[in-house]
Image: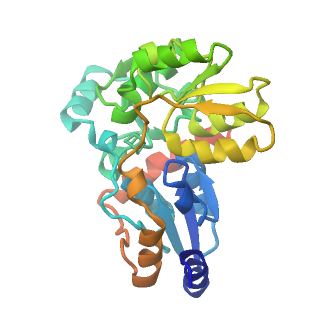
Amino acid sequence: MGIAAEVARLKKERDAVILAHYYVPPETQALADHVGDSFYLARLARELDCSTIVLCGVSFMAESAKMLNPKRTVLLPEPTADCPMAHMVRKADIDAARAAYDDLAVVCYINSTAEIKAWSDVCVTSSNAVKVVRGLPQRNILFIPDMNLGRHVSLQVPEKHFILNHGYCPIHHEMSVAEVDELRRAHPDAEVIAHPECAEEMLGRADHIGSTKQMIDHVASSPAQEFIVLTVVGVRREMERVTEGSGKRFYFPRTTPICEDMVKVTPEKVLASLRDGIGEVPMPTGADAAASALERMLELAAR
Ligand code: SF4
């Protein structure tokens, strides 16, 4: 029996649903019931009717799914798949900001550990951050962990005072400006679309900035035929799917942006996880406070 057939059989047996992030390998995305970005997966995980959720992504996503579904089994097929940015916050910096400002909200990008979420007042994703921050009563915002997303949001919410934390996604932050300029010279008619985790000088070159899902929606609706895409290359599968038959073309930097943690989640690992229960996610420490920050996000984003 092939992997896809065996996964389908085990899914039925375990009453499981497979969720996958756009950055995992295309063959893993093909096994999933739902493919999406962090916000979509977090929201969906809460609405599913199943006993087991297989989360094809990195550990903070699986932790979020577990906290929003305490009674369900959540499996992370590759338990070592982690996000380096998810750890890039020091508690001492949060304490210092809370001591310095009475009127402070600690706003935490969902790409963070449960422990860091528990130190925060509210979570955000790249697709809802502007809306959630605008909806907060506080004027001072400590944005953690991603300084690039924080800066991007601050420009759209000028009425608030932002304090940024020195965290970043290595894949987005370290994209080469020279390579992008080379792509722009080679494809002068291409639109440049970027994820807000990219560094400031990269975002300055973008025609459109948005979350992974917003980038996918943009390539589907834009009249442009060519796109220089500044995010993780795993998104290509979905971009090609939503533009099938249109002849649209996508160019990524030559030093291909791959998230080494996401690509560890292979179909073989999904199969082993479903078969042997590998990667069962325990309820994280501090889950109540972290889940409140997540719930607050869902509530503010839905307004
Ligand atoms: S792409 Fe960047 S932010 Fe996303 S999981 Fe990988 S390291 Fe983390």
Extreme residue toward the front, this view: 186
Q: Nearer the viewer, residue 3 or 173?
A: 3
In the rendered image, which quarter is residue 141 located in? Answer: top left
Residue at position x 37%, y 25% in the image: 147
Q: Quadrant of ligand 1?
A: top left
Residue 207: x %, y % from top left? 62, 16
Image position of 73 with respect to 300: above or below = below
Query: Can the viewer see residue 160?
Result: no
Image position of 91 with respect to 265: above or below = above
Residue at position x 50%, y 33% in the image: 231
Residue at position x 34%, y 69% in the image: 282
| Side of 173 where 100 appears, left or right | left
Q: Considering the image in quadrants, where does the N terminus appear?
A: bottom right
| Side of 98 where 1 appears, left or right | right
Residue 269: x %, y % from top left? 41, 70
| Side of 286 where 8 appears, left or right | right
Extreme residue toward the left, this view: 92
Image position of 115 with respect to 276: above or below = above
Residue at position x 31%, y 30% in the image: 167
Q: Considering the image in quadrants, where does the C terminus appear?
A: top right
Q: Nearer the viewer, residue 173 or 260?
A: 260
Residue 295: x %, y % from top left? 52, 50
Q: Nearer the viewer, residue 107 or 249?
A: 249
